[in-house]
Amino acid sequence: MDESTIQECDQLLLSNKIQFKFVSVYMVELCGLDSSVGAPFCRYSPHRTFYITLKNEIIEGPSLTFNELILFDKITNIKTINQFNNLYNKLYSVIKAKTLGRNEDNYLKNKLNILKSNIIGKLNEQQKKEFLLKFENLYEMSTKGFHSFTFEKGKK
């Protein structure tokens, strides 16, 4: 699936207001592995992704819970470094899912800039360095998208 197809699918889902209660994506090794094939269907819905190998191993891929999706809408409510640090892994997961197979996302960039301005002025130099390292990981996905992920063997 190329990026124009992903964008077209995203647009069709959005323009027709199609949402799913839950999405399961199964990628079969025999069919090739394009990690973005389920992205348009998972972007706004809780989901699980699985990769099935030729040896019938099931390897767990990205997943997103309903609570993580809600977190995305509330990014700008994060006001302290402790909140940010406690939510960072979930933020990373939800932003990765939202940007998989996409390029720049201006809406997300704006939300992240608000988050940064909520926190940065309250930090000492060491905290700023640590915050900016994590923040840049998130912000980079908003400017370049996320274009692949690795399945972790051994997870089911």
Image (cartoon, rainbow, N blue to C red):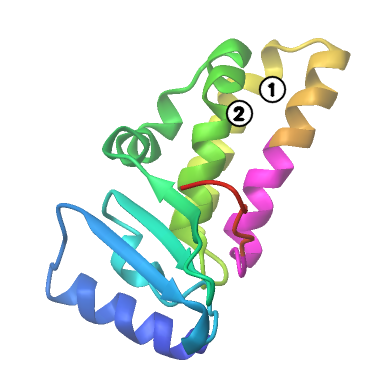
Disc ID at residue 120? 1
Q: Amino acid at mark 1?
A: Ile
Comparing 105 with 13, the one in front is 13
Residue at position x 53%, y 72% in the image: 53
From the top left corner, tell me how far across and down residue 65 is, in percent.
33, 40
Residue bounds of the magenta highlight: 135-148
Which secondary structure class fits the magenta region best? helix
For residue 155, above or below residue 19: above
From the top left corner, tell me how far across and down residue 84 is, in percent.
57, 22
* Label 1 CA crowd tier, 10 Å (few <14, some 14–19, many 20+): some
Describe residue 18's horizontal placement relative to residue 52 as left or right. Answer: left
Question: In this figure, which residue is indicated by the disc labeled 2?
Answer: 117
Describe residue 142's horizontal placement relative to residue 56 as left or right. Answer: right
Comparing 102 with 122, the one in front is 102
Q: Quadrant of residue 81?
A: top right
Q: Quadrant of residue 131?
A: top right
From the top left corner, tell me how far across and down residue 29 is, in percent.
52, 79
Look at the image and say whether residue 5 sits in the magenta stretch: no
Find out whether the residues at labels 2 and 1 contact each other: C-beta distance under 8 Å: yes
| Mark 2: secondary structure | helix
Q: Amino acid at mark 2?
A: Ser
Residue at position x 44%, y 33% in the image: 75
Residue at position x 53%, y 77% in the image: 54
Residue at position x 43%, y 61% in the image: 50
| Mark 1: secondary structure | helix
For residue 16, above or below residue 30: above
Describe residue 71's horizontal placement relative to residue 103 as left or right. Answer: left
